[in-house]
Amino acid sequence: MKELIMIRYGELSTKGKNKRNFVSTLARNIREALSAYPDITLDQQHDFMFLTLNGAPQDEVLEGLSKVFGIQSFSPAIELERDFDLLKEAAVKLVTAELAKRPVATFKVATSRSDHHFAMDTNDINQGLGGFLAEEFPELAVQMKKPDLTVRVKVREQNFLISSEWINGAGGLPVGTSANAVLMLSGGIDSPVAGYLAMKRGIRITAVHFASPPYTSPQALEKAKSLTEKLTKFGGLINFVEVPFTETQEAIKEHVNPAYLMTITRRMMMRISDELRKQYNGLAIVNGESIGQVASQTLESMFAINEVTSTPIIRPVVAMDKLEIIDISKKIDTFDLSIQPFEDCCTVFAPPSPKTRPKMSEIEYFESRLDIDGLVQRAVEGAMKEQIMPGSRNKTEEAFLDLL
Ligand code: ATP
Ligand code: MG
């Protein structure tokens, strides 16, 4: 008998000839998301993937799997020889485990066959095993319609497979099956949620963070990296790029009327992000803008900021209320980090009353006083990349939380 986890694919089962690519991308993401357990093995088959624990803790692995995009559902399962007595033994083990976890009053056995050369057919197995379990567990009643527990048996060419639990996966598409994009990641609540939602559609993100030391603290930078690590759980490795933004912010502060400081700062961020997008082979920029949330996020403002590029800007939270965004940030475990009070580059230089309806003529006037190309180029050249993997920052994060 061998304990496995059976993984069912989501939307990707409809993708025809791209399927092999989808499945291998998903397998890679699962390995990266579970990189803390290097002994697990994955066997990719046509409609399922089988994960063998090889000693890895089942609960942690199930928890890790529940976050990986592209998985529709998964079940702990037992693989065994095609022997009815062994099947009964395995079924007792599974049912006992289920009863320990939750209240169960009714059950049924559901058998399917991918091979028809076994002496018993599906009815024989359903009735034989169902009758046996009803005797073993007198507290359980057989019920065909919506039972609390379904014991699923698969008769396969080489073996039987039996499972009972059915755990919903994260859905979506495996990260890496859509093109790449750059995520503008601040330390706030919105941009990590935006990143999560983009990843859900298979986009592999590069996280770009603007830092303005000494105006912004090392803790603010650490926070952005820790947020990035939270996002790696959904699809594996993420490149984190720290952009030196001090020179740009000082130049803006010196040459731009405070009312336009916010708009022009955002335009500079957008220009630099777009250059980094090219460098990292991205086709879009993702950010956490939401209409009307703050002064820089009126449609007038977004129009003025967007005007520096024709690259698609993806704003996954654009039409959500703050409370909806917060709900997601709690679900993905970024909320507690996001609300840590570290000033980011924008708050430090924030003017008391930014323009909510910036005028293009004014923007052009102030920008003519800046060396736009030089500032962009130096920021891009000074950008520093770090690869972040799930679990890779646990220690740093603990040290960081100690500082609080
Ligand atoms: P968030 O909660 O994501 O910080 P916000 O509500 O604070 O968003 P803004 O400050 O207007 O909104 O920022 C809008 C978007 O600009 C952010 O969602 C993020 O995508 C990007 N951004 C802001 N500051 C930074 C930064 N320091 N580095 C990278 N991107 C940033
Ligand atoms: Mg912010």
Image (cartoon, helix red, strand yellow):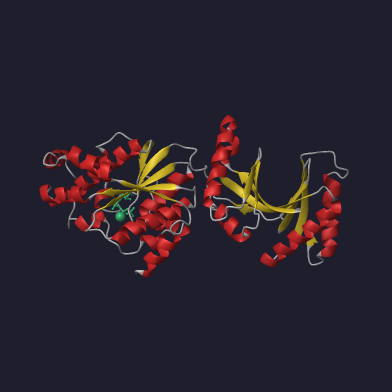
Foreground of the two, 111 or 29: 29
- Quarter assignment of residue 307: top left
Q: Residue at x 21, y 51 (%)?
A: 246
* Percent of width and height locating residue 227: 40, 56
Relative to 154, does residue 309 appear above or below in the rendering?
A: above
**Outermost top residue:** 17
- Quarter assignment of residue 395: bottom left
Q: Relative to residue 251, is residue 72 drawn left or right?
A: right
Relative to 53, does residue 18 appear above or below in the rendering?
A: above
* One can see residue 143 in this view: no
Numbered-mark total: 0
Foreground of the two, 150 or 375: 375
* Percent of width and height locating residue 322: 37, 56
* One can see residue 278 in this view: yes
Q: Residue at x 61, y 53 (%)?
A: 39
* Percent of width and height locating residue 147: 73, 57
Q: Residue at x 66, y 40 (%)?
A: 45
Q: Residue at x 52, y 51 (%)?
A: 33
**Outermost front residue:** 39
* Percent of width and height locating residue 105: 74, 64
In the rendered view of the protein, which quadrant contains the C terminus?
A: bottom left
Q: Relative to residue 313, is residue 356 drawn left or right?
A: left
